[in-house]
Image: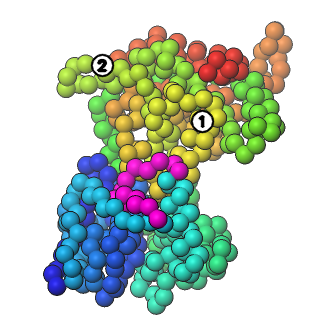
């Protein structure tokens, strides 16, 4: 018997630390190769780490909530047989049998196709339903497991909801996201300790941290995970990129009419269409017509890097905070493909399962403040990009048509850009193009 130590791998690209969210094993448990060990939260995503060894858990080197540096001990095992190759900061791949075929399993987090993601999710759900547990022990060491999924467990932790007290309404009693939301709404905040548990979530925007008259007079929020990544990114952007902005109001009536028409058509049943879908198509079209828009200023080389592909970042509001995953080669998609890509991107972001690769190499970004009832905003550029388009709400407003004032569906767009390589003339031309596109999107979409 030998003793092996599993070091925290770099589950993304150059990450330096991760927070332990949920242990799925305890000291004394006998685990198999590739059995899930722990969920960890990085600055980019919640990641499930499988075991690189088969053996007995001797030591868990961190508790839920602890932040562990990459290459530091995470789990120590007693291993009976020859150990599997030791995990390193790079991804280590093992081939294991799975339902009659061999599937690569990553130590850390891998990039899978959409079909593979759906297949793995289905297998995981089936396993939960069959065994009655999700192989995840309660964070607080409660006797017996709670039947749920890692994203729901994370949400419960952020809200301060005790999963042991939540009745699951999912299949075979599985605790769902809606169950946690209901428990959070119904649960009175009965003490300062309860309020503090809610308030110490890194998630600040979009939800109340704690009841005003119950929580402490001052609260301190640990800056880590998504909040830390966002703070560092925005500070770097403002400090290194000279930013300017342009904006315009658009008559988007024909855009909304097109969406309504497509939704009513049988061929589009079940597709998730919204003004954002059309805006994404319009921005990709603008990048093709004005390549300088999709550029990056390389200060070290004193070069402007023009990309003739669009990795379209979409700022997503999630329970973990603001993340910006991107759709690779979005300029190659038609309207249906764009709708599906946006739906998948938002769903995985909110579930905390976005692969780190989908958060890297963004070239152009959209942030949508419309769902919050906001007309517009001036966004801060993500580092390494040339422009970010902010989309406001579509709302009825007076508009002059053929000399008469009529009510139209009006949308406000604003674009922040790096003024080193994009000047006001190009930025204004882009905005005018977007206004024309959204004013009558059908011809451009039919040309795709």
Is residue 419 visible in the rendered image? The answer is: no
Would residue 110 be counted in the magenta stretch? Answer: yes
Q: Nearer the viewer, mark 2 or mark 1?
A: 1
Is residue 423 visible in the rendered image? The answer is: yes
Residue drawn at point x = 53 percent, y = 58 percent: 119
- Nearest to the observer: residue 37 or residue 241: 37
Question: Dividing the picture into quarters, in which one does residue 24 lie?
Answer: bottom left
The quadrant of the picture occupied by the C terminus is top right
Q: Which residue is mark 1?
A: 337
Q: Is residue 194 above or below residue 109?
A: below
Q: Is residue 314 left or right of residue 355?
A: right
Residue drawn at point x = 82 percent, y = 17 percent: 405
The quadrant of the picture occupied by the N terminus is bottom left
Disc assigned to residue 304: 2
- Magenta residues span 100-115
Disc assigned to residue 407: none
Q: CA distance from mark 2 to mark 1?
A: 30 Å
Instruction: Report x, y in % for residue 402.
Output: 81, 9
Q: List the single residue furthest toward the bottom.
A: 143
Residue drawn at point x = 28 percent, y = 84 percent: 56
Q: Is residue 391 above or below residue 65?
A: above
Q: Is residue 271 above or below residue 350?
A: above
Q: Is residue 129 left or right of residue 18?
A: right
- How many marks can you see? 2
Q: Earlier in the sequence, mark 2 or mark 1?
A: 2
Q: List the single residue furthest toward the front.
A: 100
How would you rate the neighbour count of disc 2 (Cα within 10 Å): few for under 14, some for 14-19, many for 20 or more? some
Q: Is residue 242 above or below residue 134?
A: above
- Nearest to the observer: residue 386 or residue 268: 268
Instruction: Report x, y in % for residue 341.
Output: 56, 41
Would residue 137 be counted in the magenta stretch? Answer: no
């Amino acid at each position: 018997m030998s003793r092996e130590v599993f070091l925290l791998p770099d589950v993304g690209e150059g990450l330096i630390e991760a927070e332990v969210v949920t242990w799925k094993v305890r000291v004394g448990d006998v685990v198999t190769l590739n059995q899930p060990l722990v969920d960890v939260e990085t600055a980019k995503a919640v990641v499930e780490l499988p075991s690189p060894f088969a053996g007995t858990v001797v030591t868990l080197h961190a508790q839920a909530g602890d932040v562990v540096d990459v290459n530091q001990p995470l789990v120590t095992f007693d291993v009976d047989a020859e150990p599997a190759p030791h995990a390193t900061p790079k991804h280590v791949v093992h081939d294991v049998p799975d339902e009659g075929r061999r599937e690569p399993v990553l130590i850390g987090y891998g990039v899978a196709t959409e079909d593979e993601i759906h297949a793995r999710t289905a297998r995981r759900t089936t396993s939960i339903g069959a065994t009655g547990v999700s192989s995840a022990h309660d964070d607080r060491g409660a006797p017996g497991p709670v039947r749920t999924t890692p994203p729901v467990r994370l949400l419960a932790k952020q809200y301060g909801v005790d999963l042991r007290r939540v009745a699951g309404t999912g299949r075979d009693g599985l605790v769902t996201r809606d169950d946690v939301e209901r428990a959070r709404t119904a649960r009175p905040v009965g003490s300062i300790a309860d309020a503090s548990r809610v308030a110490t979530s890194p998630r600040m925007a979009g939800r109340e941290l704690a009841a005003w008259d119950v929580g402490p007079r001052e609260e301190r929020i640990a800056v880590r995970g998504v909040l830390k990544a966002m703070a560092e990114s925005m500070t770097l952007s403002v400090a290194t990129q000279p930013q300017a902005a342009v904006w315009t109001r658009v008559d988007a009536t024909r855009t909304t009419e097109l969406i309504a028409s497509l939704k009513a058509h049988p061929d589009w049943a079940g597709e998730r269409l919204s003004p954002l879908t059309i805006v994404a198509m319009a921005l990709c079209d603008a990048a093709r017509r004005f390549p300088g828009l999709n550029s990056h200023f390389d200060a070290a080389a004193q070069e402007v890097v023009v990309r003739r592909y669009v990795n379209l970042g979409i700022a997503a509001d999630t329970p973990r905070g603001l993340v910006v995953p991107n759709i690779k080669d979005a300029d190659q998609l038609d309207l249906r493909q764009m709708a599906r890509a946006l739906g998948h991107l938002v769903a995985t972001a909110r579930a905390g399962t976005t692969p780190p690769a989908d958060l890297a190499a963004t070239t152009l970004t959209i942030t949508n403040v419309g769902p919050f009832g906001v007309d517009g905003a001036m966004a801060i550029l993500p580092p390494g990009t040339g422009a970010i388009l902010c989309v406001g709400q579509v709302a009825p407003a007076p508009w002059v048509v053929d000399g008469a004032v009529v009510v139209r569906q009006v949308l406000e767009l604003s674009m922040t850009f790096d003024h080193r390589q994009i000047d006001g003339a190009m930025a204004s031309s882009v905005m005018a193009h977007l206004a024309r596109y959204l004013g009558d999107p059908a011809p451009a979409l039919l040309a795709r």
